[in-house]
Image (spheres, grey):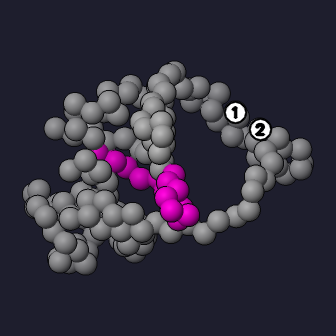
């Protein structure tokens, strides 16, 4: 009953920044689960604006690849159009989310198991940083955040 999408997240709250990319499971009734593979969805949640989502056709495989390569060429020549904005900030990925985890050494999560799904587990909310660190040490394992679980 879930759809898996690759999601990038950026959060700034009370001067603390988080930024990460991870597979995320969405229930079939959620807007994110209905986005076809060649479309994009971006959602912005602001303090005063609340939730705003923008949906549209993605560039596609070859236009995206071309632009990535062109950006890299521009950067090596020093002619990129990107400018550094503001100062660098420390990223702290301490946001807590429940996760679906399959494979690897699952005993590391023994204290936070909420459910067992066959050979996989669903955890209680745990820090993003902790799960990503575990994944680096458990090659072949799979994680997916479950933000609305």
Q: Position of residue 99 (x, y in %)?
A: 27, 59
Q: Is residue 2 magenta?
A: no
Residue drawn 20% across the image and 50% down it: 149
Residue neighbourhood size for the residue with mark 2, other residues' Cα within 10 Å, grouped as few (<14), some (14–19), many (≥20): few
Q: Quadrant of residue 143?
A: bottom left
Residue neighbourhood size for the residue with mark 1, other residues' Cα within 10 Å, grouped as few (<14), some (14–19), many (≥20): few
Residue drawn 27% across the image and 41% down it: 26
Write down the residue under mark 2: 70
In the rendered view, tell whether residue 96 sits above or below residue 72. below
Q: Position of residue 86 (x, y in %)?
A: 75, 57
Inter-mark Cα distance, 2 to 1: 6 Å
Write down the residue under mark 1: 66
Count how many numbered circles sit on residues in the image: 2
Q: Position of residue 129 (x, y in %)?
A: 42, 69
Please give the range of residues in magenta: 10-25
37 sits left or right of 103 in the view: right
Q: Do the residues bearing badges 2 and 1 touch, measured as CB atoms within 8 Å?
A: yes
Q: Position of residue 89 (x, y in %)?
A: 65, 65
Magenta highlight: main SS:
strand
Q: Is residue 16 magenta?
A: yes
Circle 2 — which element?
A: helix
Residue drawn 70% across the image and 34% down it: 67
Viewer-closest of 60 and 145? 145
Circle 1 — which element?
A: helix
In the rendered view, tell whether residue 37 sits above or below residue 140. above
Q: Tell me the tag on residue 58.
A: none
Residue drawn 27% across the image and 33% down it: 30
């Amino acid at each position: 009953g879930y759809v898996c999408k690759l999601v990038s997240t950026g959060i700034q709250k009370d001067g603390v920044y988080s930024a990460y990319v991870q597979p995320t499971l969405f229930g079939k009734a959620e807007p994110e689960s209905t986005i076809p593979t060649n479309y994009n969805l971006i959602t912005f949640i602001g303090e005063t604006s609340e939730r705003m989502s923008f949906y549209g056709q993605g560039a596609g495989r070859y236009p995206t690849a071309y632009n990535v390569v062109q950006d890299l060429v521009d950067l090596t020549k020093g002619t990129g159009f990107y400018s550094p904005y503001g100062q660098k900030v420390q990223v702290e990925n301490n946001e807590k989310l429940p996760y679906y985890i399959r494979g690897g050494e699952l005993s590391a999560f023994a204290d936070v198991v909420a459910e067992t799904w066959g050979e996989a587990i669903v955890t209680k909310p745990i820090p993003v940083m902790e799960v990503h660190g575990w994944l680096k040490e458990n090659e072949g394992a799979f994680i997916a955040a479950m933000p609305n679980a």
